Image: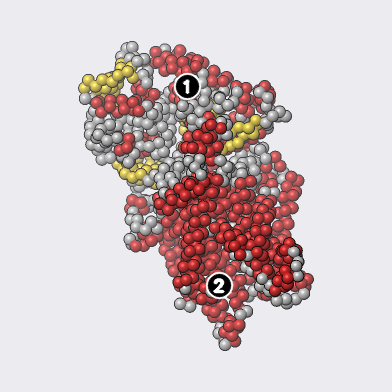
Amino acid sequence: MIEAPTPMPAAASRLPRGQALRRGLAANPLLVAGGAGAVLIVAVAVFAPVLAPFPGDAGTATHPFLVLRPPSAQHWLGTDNVGRDVLSRVLYGARISPLIAVIVLLIACAIGLPLGLAAGYFGGWLDEVIMRVTDIFLAFPPLLLALALAAVLPASLTTVVIAIAATWWPWYTRLVRGQAASVAGRPYIESCRALGISRRKIIGRHILPNAVTPLIVQMSLDVGGVILTASALSFLGLGAQDPTPDWGLMVSEGQSYFTTAWWVVTFPGIAILFTAFAFNLLGDGLRDLLDPRRTFLR
Amino acid sequence: MKPHRAWLTASGCAAVLVLAACGGSSAPVTHKTVSQVFTYDTLSQVMVDGWDPATEYSNGILAMSNMYETLTRYNPVTHAVGPLLATSWSKSANGLTWTFQLRHGVYFHTGRPMTAQATKAAILRTVKLNGGAAYIWGAVKAIDTPAPYILVFHLKYPAPLDLEASADYSAYIYDTKAAGSGSLTKWLNTPHDAGTGPYTVAAWSKGQEFEVIQKAFPRYWGGWSGAHFKKVVFRVVPQDTTSAQLLRTGQVSFVEQMNPSLWKSLRGAPGVKLMTSPSWQNLLGQLNAKALSLPVRQAISYAINYQGIVAALQGAAVPSSGIVPAGLLGHFSNLPNYTYDPAKAKRLLNQAGYGPGKKPLNLTLTYTQGDSNEQVVATLIKSSLARLNVNLRVQSLAWPTQWARGKSANAAQHQDIFMEYWWPDYADPYSWFVNLLQSQKQPYFNLSYYSNPKLDSQINRVESLVATNRTAGVQLYRTMQDEILQQAPIAFLYNDNYQYAMSAGFSGLKVNPAYPNVVFAYDLKPTGS
Amino acid sequence: MIVYAARRAALAVLVVAGVIVLTFVIARVVPGDPAATWAGPHASAAQVAAARRFLGLDRPAAVQLLAYFGGIAAGTWGVSVHTHQPVLSDIATVAPASLELVLAALVIALVTGVPLGLLSARRPGRPLDHGIRAVSILGVSMPIFWMALILQLVFAQRLRLLPAAGEFSPGLLFTHPLARHTGFDVIDALITGNWQMLGSTLGHLLLPAIVVAAYPAGLIARIVRAQVLDTIGETHVQMVRALGFPERAVFGRFAMKLAWNPVAATLALVFGYSLVNTFLVEDVFDWPGLGSYAAASISTLDTPAILGVTLFIALVYVVANLVVDIVQAALDPRIRLR
């Protein structure tokens, strides 16, 4: 999900860093829960071929004589409308969603970081132009631009990545620009310039590190949102195509059997919910931990 | 207002509204009054082909069968046609002259009486426009009207005209003078209807949920004594789970299609009745004869798991034998049909340079979006072909889009496998052959783009052969099917077994395979149970 | 104030122009070569060139863009491929149903989100706070399309408490037909005194609105909590406490007052977000709004309709943000000075 990124004011230190960290973790069970969930999902993604009882079902294998079987000892989560094991497909699906999220956010960073730094440091007309362009992109509610792009491009996971990255980069540009601008205006940066230190060193040594922390926090907050957006696009038929075991696609394929074979829709949906929830908890907790304004941790 | 009070007021209002909503809407139909409205629940838009009964060739017959009538109507019980707008008919000894006696006292919805002259005008116009299934009148050389209620057809060659006149397409009798001097098609598309049927159009909301509303035509020749539905509504519900729910709560009367497991789940539901019936509808995969060579087409035919498809569809499908379904002349259960034989398929693919370990073959299949049975079949085919190093790209498209792509003059846009249902235009196998397999310069329904001159001439002969020498005609149907199976321009996926779910609030529904999915609302008796 | 409003409006106009350019880019430039798509993958160069002429793509991009602009301004947003109607008139028909749904959802979101946020802020760090925070985050993590299916199954089918689909009971079409004035069913039913229809429309609105409200409710709860906790530390609120006002008043009247501002800003954001979320929900509930129209356009590859809907929602969103900005500035003079 996207929250309007808040600029970080000058930190008022309360406790030494390490101690604050440990107290923060203890006081923030949600962060721990989120982190555990995220680790679990990554583990499932990595070990899916070992964990899945029917790995072929995540590919083109079908079993027409086993369609729509309810959960049983052989198929723990039942089978879908062409006889594929739901558990195996859900496990393999863990490979898709977080990977898409990571790729999307890296692309958005790759665009947003340099643009934001440039806009914030140089200011002037470059800043104006970049800001107006991001304004235009931000004039679209988050899912909409992704939908429009995905609708005109051929349906595939690549399209989903491109469409969502195109929606996300302006937020990061804005965020980085805000940080860069506020740091660039400080007196000690002036002194650096006066001393003749190269622009690249100034940006690299002083501006960049300050911009990166809120960016990372924002990225961890956004993973959940990207996963939801990607599964929504697949649900609408614009993303993954059969037989890719994408959770959103599985929900849409099982829709017409839902009232008689509830397991086909329920388990992929729970997977999406669990993943988005875990990453959102993680992101939220991280933000609390790293943002010194949040004094109420104590 | 202070913030927290504002919040209290807002939530209070919301609570009141919610209570009102629950109160007002908690009327799932428990009333005992007899409903006068018959609601037909269908998956996709009905009037996609316009409102002209002469050229209609799609889903529109669902609505048109209530507004328009034909000279005769097929009776599934007697396996013969019975009287409708014609009360009796006879043919000459040589089969080239047919005489029909028309019913008296029939009025078009425009107010004019139906006479022999009006009937002749309608048929001639249908033939002239040459749309839809106008080919059914192909044997007619001339029409005479020696008396106001007598119609005489002079044929070029013998043909079963009584059967053809009962067709579900292009056989409607309508008032050609309805628009006066203006364009009749334009007038009809407003919409109006110029039929003789028990219902007439009351409203049309194109692209909306309650697409067509029909009301009773007071001057219908059958009269309105006894219990009849007074209104017919066509409701478009794309999700079959929603349709099932609407049926349970009594909000629709009849659901055209739902997936088999959903249909089974309605067994025993109060107020719901289930019905199965064999049909003359089959699902075909038309293989692109221009893009795919013979060994490849045959390989695909061997690569399909027919028994698996039937099993996966849980009672909605029965295996096909040839192109003609059981119950029609020309059906044979002992044809050289394809069976699921991956080894044979592999050998045939190898002949063409494809197969496991060789170069991969990339194909496209299109099917109609929203049809869950087609989706299952497409997935199963994709899976079977994948094992043979054939990558099938499956595309689900809305029917008008799917058909437009297949018909496109640009051959580059054509798919490799076109999945669609077919059902006959009248109770005869001819429709499959003439529409799907005869050479077409501009593809219409021959979406295999197949051209076989010998088959073409056989198709041209078969109708009159059946009329003059039935045994020889039936044998010719067999010969043609042997050839078609060998040439494999079409994969015969399965034959439909209709599974209908409907409200128990009416009686009298008889499934008529000659009019697929059509419900003649006038014949039903609302009982309000 | 006027200057501020004028400045914001001018900016909005600039943004709108940019939005139109962006949709043009998506429509014409992104899908590779539309002429090649039109002509097919095996087409010859001559066929592609002919297609390009036919589609008007051989004109210079600037000319095409101007033509597009002119079309938008004149109200010809293209013709829908599947309804054969002008896209703008299609949108005008279906938009009210979605707006109704989104507004109802926002009402539900406010009514649930604000009190939850306040409750959470009362005792930060305690189990109740963590619980409410978890629930709010759950709300924003919910896959909407899945929630719609689950709720429909549980409440409409298994428990029979609420209707499953549609905007109102179809029987009412004949017994209490709704006279349409505004296009909004609820408002029309209210102003014509059609109580049966009003009850029916509200009942059918409830379930879809709850689904759409999940995300905004979670978001609003989190923002209220964050804002209230921020302002609690501020001097003037501490003074109010010192003056002896009860805790409830400290939170409710004073801290919350300052929290309304960011909540209002969020409303514009979630309004746009929820309007797009209807794409995922309307199909399940058979709700004949923008979402169903967009979903149908996507499935029929109806590019003019898809882009028309995109443009429409983007414009609505820009206007909503503009309105909220101006209202905020009117309420909080500090904003105008920025």
Residue C247 position, x and y percent, is 57, 81
Mark number displayed over residue C338 = 2
Q: What residue is drawn where x is 54% and y is 79%?
A: C254
Q: What residue is drawn where x is 41% and y is 25%?
A: B427
Q: What residue is drawn where x is 34% and y is 57%?
A: C181
Q: Which residue carries the number 1 mark?
A: B438
Mark number displayed over residue B166 = none
Subunit of mark 2?
A: C
- Please rate how many residues cluster around mark 2, counting C-alpha atoms within 10 Å: few if below 14, some from 14 to 19, many from 20: few
**What type is the residue that disc 2 sits on?**
Arg
**What distance separates the C-alpha of mark 1 from that of mark 2?**
76 Å
Which element is circle 1 on? loop
Asked where in the image residue B507 lies, by quadrant, the reply is top left
**What type is the residue that disc 1 sits on?**
Gln
Which element is circle 2 on? loop
The outermost residue toward the left is B147
Residue B415 position, x and y percent, is 55, 32
Q: Can residue B221 be seen in this view?
A: no
Q: Nearer the viewer, residue A3 or B260?
A: A3
